[in-house]
Amino acid sequence: MQVLRSRDDIIGLTNDITRLRMSGLTFMFRGQSDASWPIQTTLYRRYKLLWHDRDCWNEYVEEYESKKRNIISRDILNYKPTQENEDFYILSTLRHLGFPCHLIDWTASLTTAIFFACSEKENEDGALWILSTNQRINTSPITVSPFQIEQPLLICKEFDLIPLGKSILNLPKGRIRRFRQNGFMSIIPQNYISKDFEYLLNDDYSLQKVTISCILKKRVLEYLNRDGKLSKYIMADISNSINF
């Protein structure tokens, strides 16, 4: 397992990924502030061992349906591509705002992933997860509800519609975050929620865990987040977006 202990290590890793991209591989990244955490959905983290003892899935679906009824406006759905499944659009937007669900966030931006790996738990090593594949990511919107998918979809691209006369800054906040973080999602169906992500991979995917030493975290964060600009940018800290 590779350990990053200096900025030179990060530069070397970046150069390696750039070379491999030129060979045709696609990379996705995930930053976690505690290297001891496995890759799991926030839904499973929320319930943990209770997942097998309670009807947690139906509790979760009911909570989602309540949010959909009570806080999803037509203004928000105006930014959904015509073909994209409504539940996928809403649920992925909620995930970018912290809603525990059966989606897992990824980013195509190495900088964004490193930022999240270093942004909390300064006394714990962080983890940079690197998922690579030679498979094409979906080039058209997801048309099936994430509640009806039976097999894991490991990497899904999200799409947004920008209506005439609008800009990215008019998007709902969750969609601006997706856009600025270059976000992608994994959809993990009910029967796979308690499985480690590595268990779901096939021969088309490779997953590497890179540890970011806690002694490096503060320096990296100070470098990336000068004057708080990166944090404000990727978290869409702006006042004129739809507050959702």
Image (spheres, grey):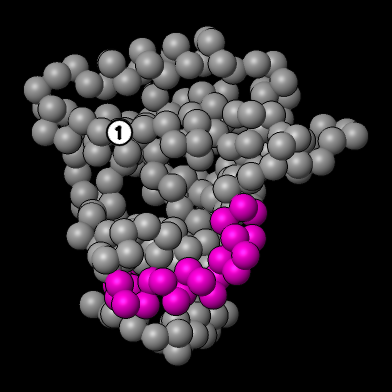
- Residue 142 horizontal side relative to residue 65, left or right: right
Closer-to-camera residue (76/134): 76
Residue 138 seen by the camera: no
Q: Is residue 83 above or below residue 14?
A: above
Please tell me whether mark 1 sits on a helix, a strand or a loop.
Answer: helix
Point 71% across, 37% down: residue? 239
User: Disc 1 marks which residue?
Assistant: 43
Point 19% across, 39% down: residue? 194
* Most frequent secondary structure within the magenta stretch: helix
Disc 1 residue type?
Answer: Leu
The magenta stretch is 206-233
Q: Position of residue 122 (x, y in %)?
A: 32, 64
The image quarter in which residue 32 lies: bottom left
Q: Is residue 169 above or below residue 9?
A: above
Closer-to-camera residue (21/47): 47
Q: Position of residue 119 (x, y in %)?
A: 42, 60
Q: Position of residue 55 (x, y in %)?
A: 19, 17
| Residue 224 falls within the magenta-colored stretch | yes
Q: Position of residue 48 (x, y in %)?
A: 17, 35
